[in-house]
Amino acid sequence: PMLRIVFPIAVHGGRARFEIPCGHIERPANGEEVPALRWADLTGARLDGKGNVGVTLLNDYKYGHSATENELALTLIRSSYDPDPLPELGHHEIRLALLPHGEDWTPSCAIRAGYDFNRSIEVVATDVHEGDLPKEKGFIAVHPSNIFILGLKKAEDGDGLVIRLYETEGKTTEAEIRIDPSLVKTDSEVVEVDLLERPIRKDTVRMKGSLLKVQVSPFGIATVKIG
């Protein structure tokens, strides 16, 4: 037994793209169910022939997607008979969102929307007191839009800071990361490291003041240790 929701999209010749870890992939829009993370997208020609449009389907924990040239579907519940005949019995609360877009859509748009949909604003109750921070403050900013932060953590072997980035649109990019001075010392030593935080090379990264620049390969992952 299976429950699936299907969204008809007013396009023809639709192309289906799906989020995978640290990237996205285009798959045939043949109706077969395939895995994806936070989003799936179907983009095709408008029925009136005036350009391309599409829809991105966002979810927070459902992963079985399928698409045809004019439909986008998500499997909500799939049960089995063995070993448990009633594995999905109970109350289900499922969050979805549809994001229509025009021709200016890029995979980076969908990735950002997927993160935003899955990271709700947390509200904390407190008393009335003077605050130390301004009304608006950012501790880290990344440019351009095809670069995303995958992780930010303390280094395993000391007090340094480790930042992991990835590129989403298949082009070599020099990422610029502006870091609040409260997190790192200005002009700190920087080095690119592997996933185990072992040094690789220094010629791909540089830091001036609180601005870090690092070269990221197409669809690549770059990890930088600061300090």
Image (tube, grey):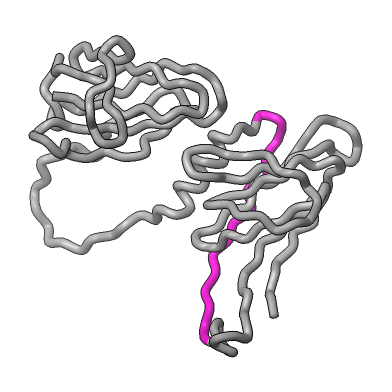
Q: Give percent across and percent down for residue 169.
A: 56, 27
Q: Which residues are magenta?
A: 90-104
Q: Main secondary structure of the magenta part?
A: loop
Residue at the image point whose x is 65% and y is 66% from the top: 75
Q: What residue is shown at x 63% (from left), y 49% (from top)?
A: 40
Residue 10 image position (x, y, % from top left): 83, 48
Place residue 66 in its image quadrant: bottom right
- Asked whether 100 or 59 is in front, the reply is 59
Q: Nearer the viewer, residue 153 or 156?
A: 156
| Image quadrant in which the N terminus is located | bottom right
80 shown above or below 221: below
Residue furthest right in the image: 48
Say left or right for 138 vs 156: right
The answer to whether residue 103 is magenta is yes
Residue 51, placed above or below residue 99: above
Residue at figure coordinates x 9%, y 53% from the top left: 129
For residue 219, above or below residue 118: above
Residue 221: x %, y % from top left: 41, 30
The residue depicted at 66 percent of the width and 42 percent of the height is 17
**To which quarter of the image does residue 5 belong?**
bottom right
Q: Is residue 80 left or right of residue 218?
A: right
Front in this rendered view, residue 157 or 43: 157
Quadrant where the image shows the C terminus: top left
> Does the magenta portion include 33?
no
- Tally the marks: 0
Q: Is residue 20 found left or right of 156 in the rendered image?
A: right
- In the image, taking residue 162 as reference, residue 20 lies left or right, namely right
Q: Position of residue 187 (x, y in %)?
A: 15, 14
